[in-house]
Amino acid sequence: MLKAVILIGGPQKGTRFRPLSFEVPKPLFPVAGVPMVQHHIEACTKVPNMKEILLIGFYQPNEALSRFLISAQQEFKIPIRYLQEYAALGTGGGIYHFRDQILSGNPEAFFVLNADVCSAFPLNEMLSFHRQRSDPDSFIMLGTTANRKQSLNYGCIVANSDTHEVLHYVEKPSTFVSELINCGIYLFTPAIFHHIGAVFQRNQQELLLGACIGEESTNGWQRAEAIRLEQDVFTSLAGQGRLFAYKTEGFWSQIKSAGSAIYANRLYLSCYSQCHPERLAQNRPGGPTIRGNVYIHPTASVDASAVLGPNVSIGKGVMIGAGVRVRESIILHGASLQDHTCVLNSIVGWESTIGRWARVEGTPSDPNPNDPYAKIDSETLFREGRLTPSITILGCNVTIPAEVVILNSIVLPHKELSRSFKNQIIL
Ligand SMILES: Nc1nc2c(ncn2[C@@H]2O[C@H](COP(=O)(O)OP(=O)(O)O[C@H]3O[C@H](CO)[C@@H](O)[C@H](O)[C@@H]3O)[C@@H](O)[C@H]2O)c(=O)[nH]1
């Protein structure tokens, strides 16, 4: 049998996702109509013999997370549990800490998935690739191609082109190493814990040695348990005949910033025509005009004269008035777009209201369309002291008056604006 672990991080992570991550933990932010990690969960449930899915992170369990776990278990009919780390233990420390829970029931192998990626998740392909290896204790890492410049932002893999063995691995190198990058999706056998355990022992030895020579140690236990899969484990596993790269041609992107959520929304919506056609809105007599891929929650009320799409997700209970135009945007639950508003390249927060004839617009941060291997840039908020033009984000419960323009701005929650704004963070 198989299991899967999704690394969801914790509240200190996801800072580039503010102000949206103030309201819900980033892994629960809706992308293409469902929480980000639901896409991972659904992919895991399509692997035959998958028996349990574990979410590991350092969020305090809250109502939103509990509600999500219950509804996902009911929908996918598989046990899904949340295991909370006592502190941020890193991408390897969390799975090592909970190794007994992962290994209970004797899984032959388990997947580990970063929560902040969107992908076609070729898990069955990774499993077949693993089963073709002669060594049953080999580990598989999903890889994809990036361009030379952007590869530096990821884990870089040098693999043997015939055997696919990972010969060399460098996490976010400062100079070019390889165009093959780590997607943050792995298939491990229980033997991975020997390798993580060795790092743990080494960390502990170093701490003991430090104590002997009188070094102060705060949080000693935590320091020994904090282990990064990438730098601490993969770097030394490379070249030992145990780690293999499975390269995917399918879609893949990180979801670090709110801008990348808009891009991920587009990628998931485009695969709905194959996997979830029922989630895509259709042009119907008496309904709004739909252009391209659009998701509309069944409880949303959309005026027949509105034009939506392409690449739009409309959340629960959203109200869309007459003559409204929405493109390349996510409208979160309870928001209200009054008559004739125009929303482009933006995320409209929960319960926010946009007044009549107002225009809310951002600048897309899409990958270069002329480069097949371009990834979305994890944009910095400021460049040379100025706010980088990006998508517009309205936090939750923001009120935009009628007839104003909000351009390339980030509006913090509960703000009531009185005029137009351009390129600003409105605190
Ligand atoms: N449980 C838990 N999860 C964590 C922790 N730290 C990070 N994570 C989760 O692990 C994933 C990776 O997070 P980062 O540490 O921010 O790494 P990264 O910059 O995204 O880079 C990683 O992913 C890239 C692909 O997206 C890889 O290319 C790169 O090599 C690396 O694996 C995220 O889903 C994050 O929530 C932790 O202490 N505990």
Image: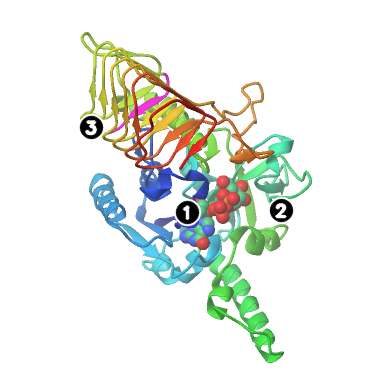
Q: Quadrant of the N terminus?
A: bottom left
Query: Can residue 253 be seen at all in this image of the molecule?
Result: yes
Q: Quadrant of residue 216?
A: bottom right
Residue count near mark 2 (Cα–Cα under 10 Å), binned few <14, some 14–19, many ≥20: many
Q: Residue at x 24, y 16 (%)?
A: 303
Dot 3 crowding, Cα within 10 Å, few <14, some 14–19, many 20+: some
Q: Amino acid at mark 2?
A: Val
Query: Which quadrant: the C terminus?
Result: top left
Query: Are dots 2 and 1 in contact, CB under 8 Å?
Result: no
Q: Report the span colored magenta.
A: 310-315
Give the CA separation, mark 1 to mark 3. Answer: 36 Å
The amino acid type found where label 3 is placed reads Gly
Taking the spot 40% from the left edge, 60% from the top edge, the residue there is 59
Q: Nearer the viewer, residue 105 or 209?
A: 209
Residue that label 2 marks: 170
Q: Nearer the viewer, mark 3 or mark 2?
A: 3
The structure residue drawn at horizontal position 38% and vertical position 14%, both measured from the top left corner, is 291
Q: Position of residue 410 (x, y in %)?
A: 47, 36
Residue 185 location (% of width, % of height) = 53, 49
Foreground label between 1 and 3: 3
Q: Which residue is mark 3?
A: 317
Please tell me which of labels 3 and 2 falls first in the chain. 2
Residue holding disc 1: 111
Q: Is mark 1 within 8 Å of ligand 1?
A: no
* Residue found at the far right of this picture: 175
- Distance from Cα at disc 3 to Cα at disc 2: 46 Å
What is the CA distance from the residue labelled 2 to the residue labelled 1? Answer: 21 Å
Circle 1 sits in a helix, a strand or a loop, which is it? strand
SS of the residue under disc 3: loop
Does residue 218 lie above or below 366 as drawn?
A: below
Any magenta on residue 312? yes
